[in-house]
Image: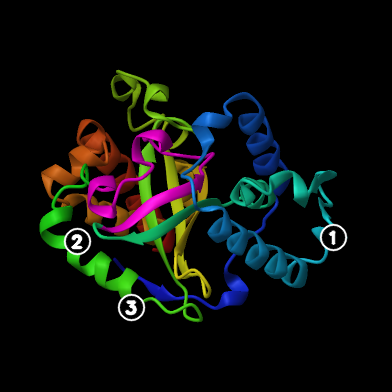
Amino acid sequence: MSLKALDPQDWIEIDDQFVKYLSQKDTLLKTRHSEVFASLPGTAASQKEVLELLLDHLLKRFPQHYRRHDQRIEAIATHQVWHISDFESAPLDLAGRLVQEDLLLMERSRQGYRLVAASLCFPLRWRLREKLGCPLTQIHSPVPGYSEKLAHPVDSVFNRLKSNHPVWRLNWSIVESPELFFPPENAKPGWETTINCQNAGDKMFLRIERQTLRRLATSGDILFTVRTYVHPLRVLEDNPQMADSLAEIIQHMPVEMQEYKNILPIRQVLLGYLGSIVETGAIANN
């Protein structure tokens, strides 16, 4: 899983895309609320714990970005002001509006940890409503080998996680669009036929998820955050070593995982493009 210890001070990330992300979340929550927010009954107390933890962190860590006025919280850069009392029945809804991360709440059950609430504005090829209430094994059923190889280690991490020792990891995908909100229906059939080594840098996108896991001290539930970054693949032209590493990963990736990550249809063009970056970098260094 490549998990690393996370300094709680670095839990949430804010960058120059802050206004764009929050504005897009606001639009999605106004126009497609049932698709990007959902919660099961009986989870309000745990959701409130998330909101209180997040508010405390944001006001201390990013005082230049947030102000609190009694029961109102303001995102200074976007001029958005929310009344906390308006979200008593769904505190996680407000929490998700405050940050660039998506927030997913996992509760321990007889079947293992299950997804009980989420503010998920930036999914990649999955739908929140189809996963709500499902345990981890079912959520990850499309992942090749998850049940056989990953289910036990993941469950072990969740069971051992301490509230004062959060962890983080990175995940990556190559996608055909820079869209942050990317449910299955946004896929572009046949896009791979338009890709060649000359346009790959602009027509393919590197989508990176910075994921964190943090146990809530009171409820014992686990908050899973996902911060999504999307860049044109040409960003690798400035880092031949990273391009070389990615090419090596793809070359050794099992076919089943290539299919899951939608790499297989673009594999040859992708490797050709990455190889050209490495070759250009080697020539420049000679």
Amino acid marked by disc 1? Arg
Instruction: Classify mark 3: helix, strand or loop.
Output: helix
* CB under 8 Å between discs 3 and 2: no
Tell me: 182 left or right of 159.
right
Query: In the image, is residue 284 above or below residue 125?
Result: below
Tell me: 32 left or right of 137.
right
Reading the chain from its start, which is encountered first: label 3 or label 2?
A: 2
The x, y position of residue 31, in whole percent, is 62, 24
**Residue that appears at 27% across and 41% down:** 261
* CB under 8 Å between discs 1 and 3: no
Tell me: 214 left or right of 243.
right
Residue at the spot of label 3: 160
In this rendering, which labeled residue sits more in front, label 1 or label 2? 1
Residue at the spot of label 1: 68
**Residue that appears at 45% across and 32% down:** 182
In this rendering, which labeled residue sits more in front, label 3 or label 2? 3
The x, y position of residue 18, in whole percent, is 69, 49
Q: Which residue is at the front of the view, 237 or 26?
A: 26
Amino acid marked by disc 2? Leu
Q: Disc 1 versus disc 3: distance between alpha carbons?
A: 34 Å
Crowding at mark 3 (Cα within 10 Å: few <14, some 14-19, many 20+):
few
Report if residue 50 lies within the magenta region: no
Instruction: Classify mark 1: helix, strand or loop.
Output: strand
Q: Disc 3 versus disc 2: distance between alpha carbons?
A: 15 Å
Query: In the image, is residue 197 above or below residue 239?
Result: above
User: Residue 150: which disc?
Assistant: 2
Q: Which span is picked out in magenta? A: 112-140
Can residue 212 be seen? no
Reading the chain from its start, which is encountered first: label 1 or label 2?
A: 1
